[in-house]
Image: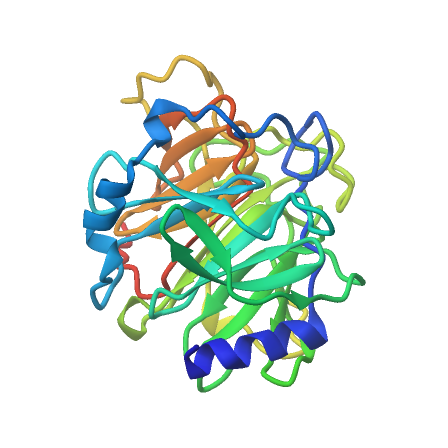
Amino acid sequence: MTKQNQRIPDIFTAALVLLVAAGCGPTTSGGQEDAGPQQQDVLDPHLREDASQLDAAPWDAPPTTPKIAYAHTTTTLYRGDPSVSPLTLFEVGDFDCIGGTGQDTSMTDVAVDRDGNLYAVSATSFYPLAVDGGTVHCVARYSLPTEARFYGLTFAPANVLAATETLVAANSAGELYYIDDQGHTEQVGTFGQVPQSDGHGHDYDTANVGMDWELSGDIVFLENGGSWVGFATLCDCPSPPDKTDCNKIDTLVEIDLTRLAPGYPGSVIKSIKGQVVKSATCTDTGNPDGYGSMYGITAWQNKVYGFSNGGNLVEISNSDGSACLVQNYPDYRFMGAGITTTAPVILE
């Protein structure tokens, strides 16, 4: 285990996290644990990858910037190469610490550090991970406190809040928290309030204007050569943090990481990129208004990839939020996603 790996469990053991993802708008369950059918015996052919392909895959020996985007459902991890368009997911394997006797029933999020090391969290525990053939092995299990309900998790690059990479979590109330290497948590910002418009001709419901933004599902921070950048998918609701009657369409925002500061109660939003509406060039006919419930997001160059609880893999422009469906996996309800903090970014 690396020095970084040794430090992270101490952070989580003392400080964090019951991860519960309740996405924007109406859902069948109101949370991740019973969000719908999950893969057990039959795999979608788009998500198959045999052992020989896994052994030969370029990500088995990661370059300086690992070209791996991760996404997962309650029990199974997937990965794909974001430098290849369209992004295609392949199954890595089931988490070996989920679903058994005495284990949690769902993995709720993943995070990736700058070296490509992978971590995961469930409702009660935190796990460093190692891929072992077709199994995603939980190297260790560290119990988590259950007082908090954070469900967006990412690594902040070095020198944002500390000299080394640190963890930032966000909750459904639109608050962001820093977790230091002594296990202390402290608020470092909020997402602010919903404006009248996203700046691209899409107004928000009058009942939602002025209300606190809620996190739809995930945040992602990136080094970007020292010009740090972050993204989040948010939702506007009439009675935050209540999810009732929320906008069914998410909003993509850019985060100003220089605003993150211990004790800071203000907004860390740099700009509203736009509601995640369908691009004019998109041929998707199944989502006439746009896309929501992005429980997981990653970023690569000028795109943000959203993984929804409805099984949508969506490519989102980081310029105006316009989006298009890449693939729908109707039986796979995504719960989280992650990518290394060194992933390249092109801001448009």
**Residue at (34% x, 37% y) in the render:** 89
Q: In which quadrant of the rendered view does residue 203 lie?
A: top right
Q: Quadrant of the N terminus?
A: bottom left
**Looking at this view, is 37 or 154 the one in front?**
37
Q: Is residue 182 visible?
A: yes
**Residue at (71% x, 38% y) in the render:** 31
Q: Position of residue 124 (x, y in %)?
A: 71, 58
Q: Is residue 271 visible?
A: no
Q: In which quadrant of the rendered view does residue 209 lie?
A: top right
Q: Position of residue 21 (x, y in %)?
A: 65, 44
Q: Is residue 281 left or right of residue 206?
A: left
Q: Total marks drawn?
A: 0
**Residue at (40% x, 39% y) in the render:** 321
Is 262 situated above or below 111? Answer: below
**Residue at (81% x, 63% y) in the render:** 147
Is 303 situated above or below 156? Answer: above
The chosen color scheme is rainbow
Q: Position of residue 119 (x, y in %)?
A: 49, 62
Q: Position of residue 51 (x, y in %)?
A: 28, 41
Instruction: Determine the residue located farthest toward the top in the rendered image.
Output: 285
Is 257 situated above or below 158? Answer: above
Q: Is residue 293 left or right of residue 327?
A: right
Q: In which quadrant of the rendered view does residue 32 lie?
A: top right
